Image: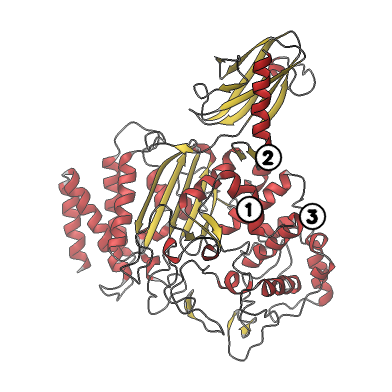
Amino acid sequence: MRRIILALMMSICILTSAEGGTWQKHVSFPDWKGYTDDTLAMNSMVSFNFWHGQGKIYFKTSGGVKSFRAFVNNKSIDTSSSECDISGATVDGINTLQVSNIEPRGNVEVFIPYPVVISGSPEDGGIRPESLELIEDIISSDIAHGFSSAQLAIIRNGRLVYSNAWGRTDTSNPDSPKVTRNTLYDLASVTKVLSVNYAVQKLMTDGKIDVDAKIVDVLGREYLDSAKAPYSNASAKTMREWKSTVTIRDVMCHRAGYSPEIHYHDKNYDLSTFQHKDGAINPFYTGIDGSEETRAKTFRAILHTPLAYKPRTKIAYSDIDYMLMCFVVEKISGKRLDEYLRENFWKPMGLSHMTYNPLKNGFSPDDCAATQIDGNTTTRGTRVKYSGLRDYVLRGEVHDEKAYHSMAGISGHAGLFSNVEDAAVLLSAMLTGGYDGHKFFSRNVIDTFTSTQDKSSGQWGLGWWREGDDARAYYFGTQSASWTFGHQGFTGTMIMADPSRNLVIAYFTNKLNTPAVLPLSRKKTFSGNWYTVSTLGFVPQILAVGMDGREDVTAQLCALISDMAEGSLKLIPKGAGKNHPSFRNAESKIDVITKWGKRYGLDELKEKAVKLRGMLR
């Protein structure tokens, strides 16, 4: 018994000595709540989150205990060793441990870590092969017809059941490397939730931050001193009153009052029209060199930026909100945002393909999927110009101008690079609260951040986008539960987690790495935006077909892709020629139904393909 206890204590010492080592559950039996609950049965039972086929728990006895019994999900487990393998008893989701018959009546201390992501197959994840086949065919066909590239990773019930990559890193260079599962993508606004949200959620779990704290109390009285801006008619007194009420929650809910964006790097940024104008004077101009000194100036500029509307009167999605929150995190944690994330998440989880400024952190341009072909000269339906404007293919440099020029590449609104697998693994921690021997978030904090924050709409959490009443179907599909959460990025990236199905999806494209379409359209400036692959939500929509079912869904998917092909013709603008990306997108869908018709010997699909090709001409 002494050897067992010594071995157990050694195991515990090894685990707890790990940097940031904590536990999902650390309780002592009997009466693990610390008192004898009059339900009586509860005193011997505690629940924890895990995934089937994996798991260990650790025991430590005191008070002369010589024997006890333990059960996980009704199965008796071996208690002769300090380290107990429970992989044969765990289930997906909530598991229950019972510790009983402690003799003599001493204490049995239990340490339960968090689950990790292990490898698996689509079959393990209950995913129909036909659904994956259609997703793969659509992506491959769109790339063959002019789209850029894509990566997809799927985690189900704690297993990485699918990971794949398509295309080349740069469509402007046919000799560029092929995209692999390790290629980094510019996450754009997905950065918001995987950086600031993760940091604030952990700081809140650790008792170091209150989301209802006022910004002025965190960043100081200078926050109340706002410069006069053309877009705000509020008096100095009114502005001080408004800003004095702004909380961290307001900022993260995009209801603090900030404009969608201010180009602090553009000296001639016209704040009355929010675009470049020769001769205009930007009172918040900070410089363009991307240095730490400019980043410090940007902090001061954000402090003095006035609000565009009264806080909490509406929701207006804003990059400024998360640039501000970047500095809130740094103020409270005492570390630069990337350092805090690396120390608390990336390193403990073994995420080797997630970073800011990849070209400064061991990666080469060939390791990164390129974004815009002409730098930042074309964006959202307009041509832009300013001193220092990048006009070359962006590879390994953050696409977002504010992050690049004003924030030294490290911001809360943009700047993070990752491959899909690391992003999916990181997001999976939102289903459990931690990873292996590391606790990140309490269950209460996860619920707070992913629950609706606006009574009039269920599509917003605290920073997280929610499915709500099909409000995010374009990204998360229509089969997702209302509390499904995630985020999208301007460069063509998306992450989502559906707790009802223990499902995590990371799907990345570099849709901006395609030519601009003339005449310029704000909604679809780049040709990549015209392809099905760029819609992001088609992946979870098709993936859900037949999930957890035993019946072949080929017939259903054939009917679906037939409808998709017919619908693609409706998206072709009047007068668009054969070289227009909408036309090539339609050709791509017709090619897919042709392929499926031949593969499964379906004459109706073959005939449909011939009919649609005739309509294209």
Horizontal relation, residue 246 to residue 536: left or right: right
- Point out residue 343 in the picture as x, y percentages from the top left corner: 65, 50
C-beta proximity under 8 Å, tags 1 and 3: no
- Point out residue 386 in the picture as x, y percentages from the top left corner: 56, 84
The quadrant of the rendering that contains the C terminus is: bottom left
Label 1 is placed on what type of residue? Leu
In the figure, residue 83 lies in which quadrant?
top right
Label 2 is placed on what type of residue? Ser
- Point out residue 353 in the picture as x, y percentages from the top left corner: 50, 53
Work out whether 499 lies above or below 534. Answer: above
- Point out residue 87 in the picture as x, y percentages from the top left corner: 51, 25
Horizontal relation, residue 369 to residue 565: left or right: right
Which of pointers 2 and 3 lies earlier in the amino acid sequence? 3
Q: Tell me which residue sits at (67%, 54%) in the image.
A: 340
Work out whether 476 lies above or below 226. Answer: above
Kindly tell me whether residue 229 is visible in this rendering. yes
Mark 2–mark 3 distance (CA, rounded to whole Å): 19 Å
Q: Nearer the viewer, mark 2 or mark 3?
A: 2
Q: Which residue has dot 2 on it?
A: 442
Q: Which residue has dot 1 on it?
A: 341
Badge 2 marks a residue whose secondary structure is: loop
User: Dot 3, how many residues are within 10 Å of its Cα: few (below 14), some (14-19), or many (20+)?
Assistant: some
Work out whether 371 lies above or below 41. Answer: below
Mark 1–mark 3 distance (CA, rounded to whole Å): 22 Å
Q: Which residue has dot 3 on it?
A: 213
Badge 1 marks a residue whose secondary structure is: helix
Which of pointers 1 and 2 lies earlier in the amino acid sequence? 1
